[in-house]
Amino acid sequence: MTAQPLAKDWAFIRAAIDSLQDYLLSSELYWPLFVQPKEKVTGNLLQLTLGNLLLTQARLKGFPWTGDQLAQLTQTNEKIFQTREKWKSAWKKKAVREFPARFKLWQDYLDDLCDQPRMHAANYPFQVRWRTVLHFLEIEVTGLEVDETGRVQEADQRLKNVSQPANFVWEAEIASGFPKQEFWYLYLTAQGC
């Protein structure tokens, strides 16, 4: 039996749906999620944050699902949308709080990449998730006061100076969900300063 594509993403989003309202109404920025017994994945799930949720949705949308899996994804996204609409203010507050935290992680990685390129360049496919999360959070905080939004462009220029073009950094099957023109940083390899 072949493993389900993006099984960990599915496990995350199913666990996230069950906890989303409680998370939005809490004061916590990071909410632990646990693999449900019916899931066929090992290891820990990412913590629930809006950025992780939005990125996981995009990853799942990027895969060419058919039949039951496509119907399940549509239903899952509708549940998330309904919860978001019901708790719109809480959703925005979480996005505003998460943006600077994710920007700091991305900035710290770029600093590490410049300081020790041999050690940190290989981590780029994982670390670039912070830049991708910033993309989705930036949409959520548009029009709100978040100091780091302008600094993302400066960090982007810095990244361009320490990278070169490459193939899509994640699973090839989801690349269509991340067009190169918009998500150019997912089509790079890091070189260091």
Image (tube, rainbow, N blue to C red):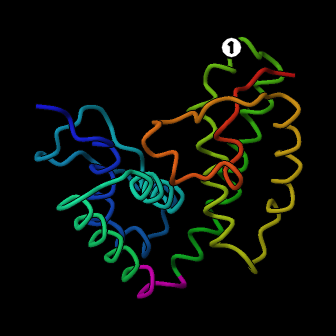
Name the quarter where the C terminus is drawn.
top right
Q: Choose top left, top right, bottom left or bottom right for residue 138.
A: bottom right
Q: Choose top left, top right, bottom left or bottom right for residue 149.
A: bottom right
Tell me where residue 64 appears, x and y as whole percent: 36, 53
Tell me if residue 178 comes above or below residue 73 in the rendering.
above
Left or right of residue 183, residue 157 in this image: right
For this rendering, which residue is in front, 98 or 122?
Answer: 122
| Residue 86 falls within the magenta-colored stretch | yes
Left or right of residue 44, residue 138 in this image: right
User: Residue at point 66% right, 58% down?
Assistant: 135
Q: Which residue in the protein does label 1 denote?
A: 119
Tell me where residue 84 appears, x and y as whole percent: 44, 79
User: Residue at point 58% right, 31% down?
Assistant: 125
User: Residue at point 22% right, 41% down?
Assistant: 4
User: Residue at point 76% right, 24% down?
Assistant: 113
Mark 1 surroundings: few (<14), some (14-19) or many (≥20) residues within 10 A: few
- Where disc 1 sits, the SS reads helix
Tell me if residue 42 comes above or below residue 86 in the rendering.
above
Tell me where residue 173 appears, x and y as whole percent: 42, 41
Q: Which residues are magenta?
A: 84-89
